[in-house]
Amino acid sequence: MSAPVPPAAVPGVRATRTTDTHCPYCSLQCGMAVTAGDRPATLVPLDFPTNRGGLCSKGWSSAELLDHPERLTRPLVRAVAGDRTSPLVESTWDEALDRLVGAIRRTQATSGNDAVGCFGGGSLTNEQAYQFGKFARVALRTSAIDYNGRFCMSSAAGAANRAFGLDRGLPFPLSDIAEADVVVLVGSNPADTMPPAMQWFDAGRERGAQHVVVDPRRTATARNASLHLQPLPGTDLALANGLLHIAIAEGLVDTDYVAARTTGFAEVRAGVAAYWPDRVERLTGVPVPDQRRTVFALARADKAMILTARGAEQHRSGTDTAQAWINLALALGLPGRRGSGWGTVTGQGNGQGGREHGQKADQLPGYRSLADAAARAHVAAVWGVDPDDLPMPGRSAFELLDALGTDGGVRTLLVLASNVAVSAPDARRVISRLRDLDFLAVSDFFLSETAELADVVLPSAMWAEEDGTMTNLEGRVIRRRKALDPPDGVPDDLQLLATLAGRLGAGRHFSGDPETVFEELRRASAGGAADYSGISYRRIEEERGVFWPCPADDHPGTPRLFSERFATPDGRARFVRVEHVDAHERPDAEHPYVLTTGRVLAQYQSGTQTRRTRSLQLVAPTPRAELHPDLARALGIAQDDVVELTTRRGRARFHASVTDTIRPDVVFVPFHWGGGASANALTDAGALDPVSGMPAFKVCAVAVRRVSGPEERIPPPPAAAQPRPAAHRVAVAPRAHPPSRSTPTDPLTRRTPVKSTPRFLQGVFPLTGEGLAKPGPIDPALRYTVPAGCSAQALYFRGGNSTGELVYVLLVRDGEPMRWFPIGAKADTHVPLRVVEDLVGGSVVELHAAAPEGVTGEIVVDLGLVEV
């Protein structure tokens, strides 16, 4: 609500007013009050249920951008129409829209309706996202629409829909986190990505709650946890299956809950029988005692939660990974219990609402399926069109982008609220595709890296200059209120779409008024999974937000889901058997390390806004690649050196951050920068999740080299050294092939016995070096022969070195080297062995060592194996 301040009595001074609204950044949607009149606007936090008076640095600085000197206030067009080598110059709205509408009509006339496409974003309001989907299907009559949330929430959404029949990120209010006795956070770092949310975690810890963080980095969130599990990126599914294996073996499954409220447990139980703890340690690097501690904590707590996020979900098997954690939660009887359950931590500001109302390739408003005849008939009736005129589902986000400029692909593209040149995987490939377009139009408030490639750039109103609704990570529908007017002549995206529809002859179906559009959205969503029909602007104002589903005006909304039944036809949740699959790219001699990506505290998404915010740039002025000290030492890299990372898709350069918070075999980079420091120039889009279409943002193989010492400005990699972008082709992830195991017949049997025997080659031994190129046996005790009829797996290697020089330990199988382990001077190392193959009966395993000639001292070795 707005609280206008009386006009000032001083001549020439404009009246000010204060408006309650919400932060434009993450899915917390923290409450804030914006005071505007004389620019610049100022803000203070509000005591809203999610943030309770807290704001992070991004929220505090959000008003800085409203009057930024780089802000776009007039349309830009190419000086020579059709020539993108000519400069972008200011133009009139008529000329810019004429060029866009002309391109749409030419493309449709020559290549068909589906050759015109739309790409949206998770920061659009509910009204804008709804209208964008409607615009594509009614004004353009194209199937080609998707949005950047496909790169964010789609795997968790796919798993939740499959298991529960409904996708709402948190099926309970954020405040329930404070009530939980145990919380397991998988691939989430809210201390950096949404700091005000930490007050709920802090409140839980103050009353004795245990928090377990699963992350390859010791993040700010992990540092405050009771237990930190540090798996290799891409192995979270194996870890979840392994935890469920322990729960079954130890009799910790809630058998009454499983029998009464779920289906499919027998098949899952059979699948996880293959994930015995030693094998899971070998795959993930998480020690068996930590696996057991986690399971027992979850099972014995009165209230327990499992929360997943992008670290677990942005993989080619992201949907199955989220499902594996849901399976664990269901087996322990957590979903539907007060203070317990499974949820996913939505990232983008309207990441929840943006995926509910139609800007996805396969979706109609209310989370309806575009392929469902009844859904098409319902929505078509609301829109006043023939259901047969609605297109069928189109390509998912990366598939859409990868086909740009091709026969059968999009040739004219309209982008709203998205910077795909930075945020899409294999970004150099996507930039190449954008250049292949016949016409590109971008609506934004800054000249983003994507807008720089456009034929037409359309300025847009910013968050404090528009009205509408957002839906936060809890499923709470809230009001974004207009606090000040945009620059003269600058519309918001809702008005832009209504104007474009009018020029395309479909204006009667569209409005630029947000409340009018929301009233239509209510009708369109009625009866759908995401039912907003009982929510109104008035109710949101009076109740400080309303939780969907809310199917009637007198319905109270639904803060907590699944207390009595799940949103499936029979009311039961679905267990789904899922299997670990290796990353699409595994390290090799050329690219020996694992790259993972993510966010940092003072930046957000593609950085279009935060990289232009002076106060945030002072905190995070440069992109940094995090390397473990052991890796940095081996490569001759020091703090702040310029390093170049190389994958099969590209090269990028960063300042080095040498830190022991990351695994020695993993490199982390933030994805907020473009150009020569683009993390997504490196990421892998070669295999997409078969359910969600999610690329593998979180794991690929990478090489690292030192370029130079510290430099204030990082020079980009030479253009000639960059690999050529891949040809037009999208690979889909193959099905997982689980190990062959016997299938138990009783789904609730207490144990699945798997006979395994640990073996160790360990001790302290003298060492005399004969040269690093001359390894030799350390001691006859460090030799093991696998018994006939058995097999063995190496789980880990630990080593220590008392000498003042680098030494190597070599794992040898049947006389052939398998793996080298460098141990630094007077240092130690611990290496989880996920890539060493099974050792069949009769194999002989030995440990050899090599040291510089003449070096003497002692080494400590500990090779752990399991014999089965």
Image (cartoon, rainbow, N blue to C red):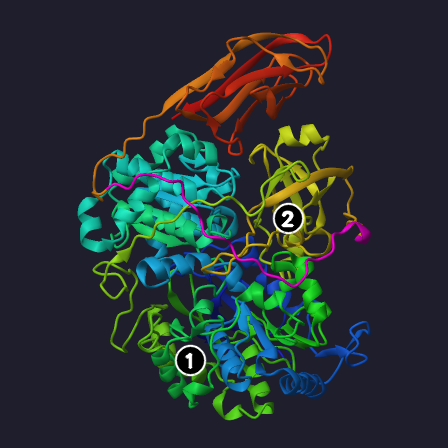
Residue 49 within the magenta-colored segment of the rendering: no
Residue 853, relative to residue 642: is it above or below? above
Q: Nearer the viewer, residue 300 or 55?
A: 300
Tell me where residue 480 appears, x and y as whole percent. 47, 71
Q: Quadrant of the N terminus?
A: bottom left
Q: Give the range drawn in magenta.
A: 719-744
Residue in the foreground of this view, choosing between 526 and 139: 139
Residue drawn at x 35%, y 49% is 577
Query: What residue is at 75 percent from the left and 82 percent from the top?
Result: 91
Name the residue beneath numbered marker 2: 619
| Residue 751 spot, x, y in % from top left | 24, 34
Q: Is residue 693 above or below residue 445?
A: above
* Residue 742 highlighted magenta (yes or no): yes
Magenta highlight: main SS: loop
- Please state the horizontal and vertical placement of residue 819, each as a whole percent of the image: 59, 26
Q: Label 2's element?
A: helix
- The Cα atoms of the two marked residues, 1 and 2, are separated by 39 Å
Q: Nearer the viewer, residue 818 or 626?
A: 818
Give the quarter of the figure containing the C terminus: top left
Asked if one can make out residue 419 in the rendered structure from this viewpoint, the answer is no
Occupied quadrant, residue 503: bottom right
Q: Which mark is residue 518?
A: 1
